[in-house]
Image (spheres, rainbow, N blue to C red):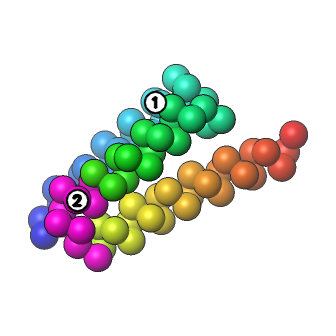
Amino acid sequence: MDYEKFFADVITWINQTNQLAVKYGMESSDFWTWVTHSTGELANKYDNNPLAIKQMVMLHEWLDEIYFSSKGDQ
């Protein structure tokens, strides 16, 4: 696996995630549908390499934590 390319794609994915969070809001089903679909797509792009899977799962969990911590502040 080309780690430099993978992590460059991860950075792009994080930037896209930030843009979509602003556009749709983290409460939007459109946002979470995109997150779920795109994490799978990125792992698939790298033949479901264990590192790619774990990285994308971690990023999805990280977004979950951000979402639920913001809900606790209200």
On the image, the x and y values in percent for residue 29 come to: 57, 35
Mark sitting earlier along the chain (1/2): 1
In this view, the mark in front (1 or 2)? 2
Residue picked out by circle 1 = 19
Q: Residue at x 17, y 66 (%)?
A: 47
Q: Residue at x 44, y 49 (%)?
A: 36
Can you tell which mark lies on residue 58?
Answer: none
Callout 1: SS: helix
Residue 71 lies left or right of residue 37; in this view the side is right
Q: Which stretch did the figure color magenta? A: 42-50
Residue at the right extreme, as displayed: 74
- Kindly identify which residue carries mark 2: 44
**What's under tag 2, amino acid-wise?**
Asn
Q: Quadrant of the N terminus?
A: bottom left
> Separation of disc 1 and disc 2 at Cα?
23 Å
Where does the image place residue 67, in percent across and percent down from the top left?
Answer: 67, 47
